[in-house]
Structure formats: C-alpha cells, structure tokens
Image (cartoon, rainbow, N blue to C red):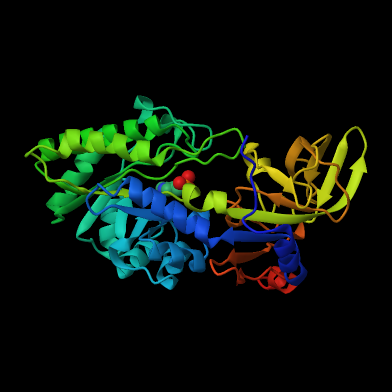
Amino acid sequence: MPEKRLPISAGRLREIVAQHPTPLYLYDEAGMRQSARDLAAAFAWAPRFRNYFAVKATPNPHILRLLAEEGCGADCSSLPELLLAERAGLSGEAIMFSSNDTPAEEFVAARRLGAVINLDDVGHLGYLELHAGLPDLISFRYNPGPLREGNAIIGRPEEAKFGCTREQLLAGYAAARQRGIRRFGLHTMLASNELDPGYFVATAQMLFGLAAEISRELDITFELINLGGGVGIPYRPDERPVDLAAVGAGVRAAYEGTFGGAGLPPPALALECGRVITGPHGYLITTVRHLKTTYRSYAGTDASMANLMRPGMYGAYHHITVVGKEEAPADAAYDVTGSLCENNDKFAIGRTLPELAAGDLLVIHDAGAHGHAMGFNYNGKLRSAELLLERGGGARLIRRAETVDDYFATLV
Ligand SMILES: *Cc1c(COP(=O)(O)O)cnc(C)c1O
C-alpha cells in the first residue's frame, strides 16, 4: 500500500508551524504544476486543448496564477470567481463562465472580461442579450437525463438542476444563430470525483456524437467542446490515480471517430478539472488538543468541519497521518474531531492511528480541492491561513488566517 506523505520533512513542518500556528493549509507548488502538466500531456494531441481550472476548488489567485503558467484557464461560476481569475492575470477566452441561476451583473462581468459564456439554460440567451449583450461565441450545457448515470456527489443527471435537454439545445443554437451568433460551444459536466477512465471516454463519445448531430440538423459547426471536470483522486491509500493517459487516448479515439473525416471541422477541446490538479497537493495541518475516552476514544483537534467540510458533508474519506509517528504501529482507534457543536464534526470515525498524545501534529491529506474553499464561520469558527510550499523550499503565506475582527467586520 503506498503511504501518503508530506513533501517536506517533519522538521521543516515544525519550523513552519512555529511561525504559522495550526490549523493551516499547505499547498505543494511542484505537485500542482506536475498535475497540470500530466493532464496537458494526456491531451497534447487535441487541437487548442485547455484545462479551465475550476476556481471553486481552490480559489486563491496565487494558485490560479501558477496554474496559468502551466497553460490552465479558469472556470468560474460567480462574480467573485471571475474577479479572482482577473486578478490572476487571466482574460478573454482563457476564462470559462459556467454558471447557473445567473444574476445579470455576473453576465456583465463575464462579457467585460471577454469570457466564454456557457449557458445553463437556453432561456438565458434573451436575458444575456438584454443585460449584457450577446458575445460572438455561445456555449450551452447539456444534461443527458436518463441516458447517463451520475454519481454520489453530483447526483443523477435526471435529478440534477444543471443543463438543458437535447431538444432545448437544438432550439437554443437555432435561436442564437438567428440573433447573429456564429461561433458555438457545447459543454457537459456529469460526474464528480470519478475514478473510472471509461466514464470520461463515454461522456466524450456522447458529446461528440451530439455535436455532430446538431451540426447536421442545424448546419452549424462547433468550435469548442468542453467535457467538464470531475476527474477523481485516490483519497484512500488503496485507490489508484486515474490513468490520465488512458482517458486522453480513449477521448482521442472518440474524437477522431467523429471529427477525423472530411465532414466536420475539428473543434477545440476543453476540460474544467479542479480536484485532480490541486486535491492531492493540499494538506490540512492540525494539532491534537485533547484526548478523551467515553464509549469510544476521541482525538480533538484545533481544526474543525469549518476548515474541511467534506467528511461531515459527504462522509468523504481523508487519510490522516501523524507527524513523526509514520513508522509507528496503527493500533489505536479514534474519532478525530473538531470543536463544533455538531456531532458530524469528525474528520474520521473509528480510524486506526498510532497512539496519539496532545500536541501531536496531524496531516489530513488530499485537502487541496474543495477543502479551505468550503470553509465557513458557523459556531464562530474562523478560516485558517493558506501557505504555498514553493519549489525553492520556501513556505509563502498566500492567505492569512481570519481574525475575530474579520468575523465582526460585516455587522452593522
Ligand atoms: C465543480 C465543477 C467543476 C470541477 O469539478 P472537479 O471535480 O473539481 O474537477 C467543473 N465544472 C463545473 C461546471 C463544476 O461545477
């Protein structure tokens, strides 16, 4: 079983923690860059390929900027996310705006930045025209409904609020063309944290086939096909990373099957992956504060569900290691908890770990995506600092910890 490890020594971590008190998030720059490169390499065959990094996964402009250096764009779904992408130096079609239930001012901001606008509903076309004007290129999000199964995080497409039906797409592209739009994109996003390469190949096959059908029925051509995000990561030590090369090769075969002939011009290919880029390279570092035994044993930490909600929200597994006890036998079972007045404030339930002592540093692994980003202030909890472990060995503060003054800042 491959062990999950921090990319730095225990001694170096202790130095960092001496300067920046726990809880804190650490992100490994080299690892994030490498993941962006691995994904780009798997799709190097694809015309004008771009991964639009899903900003919601790790909404920090320092991280967006280093991913932009690796060729990533930004996938945004709100005004603040658009402004984060702008701060990271992105503009124009390096920004994808894949929103839903969208307010007018967000369309205005997306138009100002020249972003690719990906509409969740064909009815939004008139709303966009009214409030922000129409762009040159319009994309719609497809929801295949009962034709595909989703998974636990995102739900079944049939019950998901996202996207439009095939009939609606046909009406939408026809209406867009009638309003003078000549550049078209097509998008879908069906699964989240999916580990099966075949799932992405099947999605690509479906979307390419649909693009070809719509092209023929309406006599339009697609300039951009966006397969969404959702590539999973091995949260459990016995899981394997997704074979990105296999995904790339499978999608390539489907792409060439549809666009390889003389008929349709080959569209650019896009993804919107967040998790697979930053997830494995972010660590929540927390200190054991109190140990307690009642009907079972509890390790109370200085972090809480307000710092990492995934275990409490979806029962998600996050691997935990104990700094300096990596080789010690895991012969004690703990519920690893935070201090919220909620019993689902647990990072792990009945987890076997080495015998813990107050003051032990815990590393909660694979917290780089949808981790700090989902933080909240319930129970007066404050969000932690974020630090970037730079390639040169430095640890740079890229977001300070919240203070009590921040908590009071919005009160009138
Ligand atoms: C959340 C989301 C993504 C990113 O998902 P990951 O699982 O982080 O890859 C991409 N596109 C849309 C529309 C999303 O909502």
Image point 53% across, 32% down: which residue?
152
Q: Position of residue 30 (x, y in %)?
A: 51, 60
Front residue (pair 218, 5): 5
Image point 80% across, 42% down: which residue?
328
Q: Is residue 321 left or right of residue 105?
A: right
Front residue (pair 13, 272): 13
Q: Is residue 160 above or below residue 54?
A: above
Q: Residue furthest top?
A: 146
Image point 76% across, 36% down: which residue?
351
Name the quadrant of the N terminus.
top right
Front residue (pair 84, 62): 62
Quarter of the view holding residue 42: top left
Can residue 214 be seen in the rendering of this structure? no
Front residue (pair 151, 9): 9
Quarter of the view holding residue 22: bottom right
Q: Position of residue 272 (x, y in %)?
A: 39, 50
